Image (cartoon, rainbow, N blue to C red):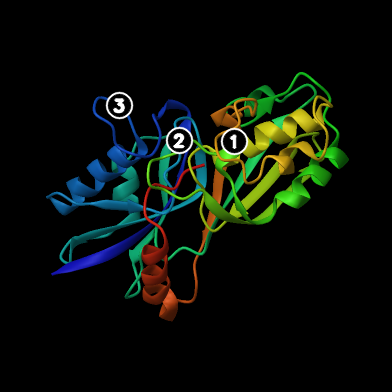
Amino acid sequence: MVTRLRLDLAYDGTDFAGWAEQPGQRTVAGVVRAALETLARGPITLVVAGRTDAGVHAIGQVAHADVPAAMVADLRRLNGLLPRDVRARDLAAAPPGFDARFSALSRRYAYRVHDGVADPLRRHDTLTWNRPLDLAALRAASVPLVGLHEFTAFCRARPGATTVRTLLALDWAREPDGVLVATVEADAFCRSMVRSLVGALLAVGDGRRSEAWPASLLGAPARADDVLVAPAHGLTLMSVAYPPPDEFAARAERTRARRTGPQSG
């Protein structure tokens, strides 16, 4: 007998080679799986909502694991086994049909960038930009990117994988401390898509490109070589949205039929 656990996770991605396990690399999945296997006293498989890249952080990551029903799923014990740069925020038995990846409706990211004197205490999660950024231009250039589009120009291609995505939200705000925050939400993201969108928009915000330029790249047949992939450390996975519990299984079935392959920012 097994029990499916839902894990809500937060981590500082600075010292990780991303979420996905890689031989000889320190990864978030590697340390979380190792801690769970200590509790389960046996091997487990970990499934995640979105595979974050090296250096990307998370506040609202979600994963699931099928563990022996007899395993004591104790949040304090799990956090006691995890390194200090990863915390389990919640740990509970998942409702029937729940799949951390395929049941998800959307993923929401935030990208932080400062165009002034940055707070040194936020250096690990905020990009410092050495040119003034125009908030109105950033917002105007973001509007036509929202919706269902072919985002090949902003993605690192993977053979056989689609780069058609539905961008649900893309907007910017300046916080009281001067930090500009881009909020980006989609049903899913292809590799480096969020950071590429931000990189293109920063070129608009500092005046090097027109407001129409990012949208002009939509539908391009190949990645745009002149689009900057913004540094990873400014990006944080904020949350993953799910339907009501009675729709978990149906949502997962529909998503599997439509798309397979890694999701990352």
The one of 228 and 113 positioned closer to us in this rendering: 228
Q: At label 2, which amino acid type do we have?
A: Asp
Q: At label 3, which amino acid type do we have?
A: Gln
Q: At label 1, which amino acid type do we have?
A: Arg
Q: Position of residue 60 (x, y in %)?
A: 51, 52
Q: Disc 3 on helix, strand or loop?
A: loop
Residue 72, by quadrant, is bottom left
Q: Earlier in the sequence, mark 3 or mark 1?
A: 3
**Residue of label 3:** 25
The one of 204 and 163 positioned closer to us in this rendering: 163
The label shown at residue 195 is: 1
The one of 107 and 208 positioned closer to us in this rendering: 208
Q: Position of residue 155 (x, y in %)?
A: 53, 39
Mark 1, residues whose alpha carbon is within 10 Å: few (<14), some, or many (≥20)? many
The one of 108 and 42 positioned closer to us in this rendering: 108
* Quarter of the figure with the N terminus: bottom left
Horizontal side of residue 186 vs 40, given as left or right: right
Q: Residue at x 42, y 63 (%)?
A: 258
Q: Earlier in the sequence, mark 2 or mark 3?
A: 3
Q: Nearer the viewer, mark 3 or mark 1?
A: 1
Q: Position of residue 11 (x, y in %)?
A: 46, 40
Q: Earlier in the sequence, mark 1 or mark 2?
A: 2
Residue 103, by quadrant, is bottom left
**Residue of label 2:** 53
Mark 2, residues whose alpha carbon is within 10 Å: few (<14), some, or many (≥20)? many
Q: Are marks 1 and 2 in contact (CB under 8 Å)?
A: yes
